[in-house]
Every structure is written in structure tokens, then in C-alpha cells.
Image: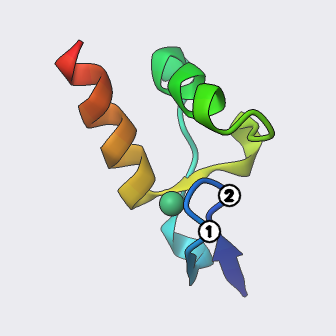
Amino acid sequence: MDYICPVCGEKLPRSMEHIVPHTEKHIVDAIKKKNPKWAEKDGTCQKCYDHYKKEMGKQ
Ligand SMILES: [Zn+2]
């Protein structure tokens, strides 16, 4: 079964889904700011997670 990343729209294998941990609320907030419909339980792909994590590291 495929997983479609709600953040970038890319189709990936379900195993590539990445759930953002509660402890990384700053990342959750950053994703929500750009994707208001997104919820934590939707997850992201590893690429998006890495992207937002890197963005957060700059601030
Ligand atoms: Zn993505």
C-alpha cells in the first residue's frame, strides 16, 4: 500500500512514512504553518521531515 505525503504530495511506500514525535513540536508547528490542513497523525515523508528539521536548526 502506498503512502502519499500530505506535505509534498509525493507517493512513497508506506514504510517511508515518518511520524513527527510529540517532542518535536516546533517541527509540527512549522509544517502546520505552511500546511494548515496537516495533522501530526498524517505524518510526512523522510524528505519533508529532514527539510523542516533543517529549517528549524537555522533559527
Ligand atoms: Zn513529503
- Between the residue at mark 1 and the residue at mark 2, the CA separation in whole angstroms equals 5 Å
Asked if the residues shown at circle 1 and circle 2 are in contact, with their CB atoms under 8 angstroms apart, the answer is yes
Residue closer to the observer: 49 or 1: 49
Total numbered badges shown on the rendered structure: 2
For label 2, the residue is 6
Side (left or right) of 59 relative to 13:
left
Side (left or right) of 3 relative to 52:
right
Direction bottom: furthest residue = 1
Q: Amino acid at mark 2?
A: Pro
The residue positioned 67% from the left and 72% from the top of the image is 4
Q: Looking at the rendering, in which quadrant would you find the C terminus?
A: top left
The residue positioned 54% from the left and 37% from the top of the image is 20
Side (left or right) of 47 relative to 6:
left
Name which quarter of the figure residue 55 lies in: top left
For label 1, the residue is 9
Residue 36's disc is none
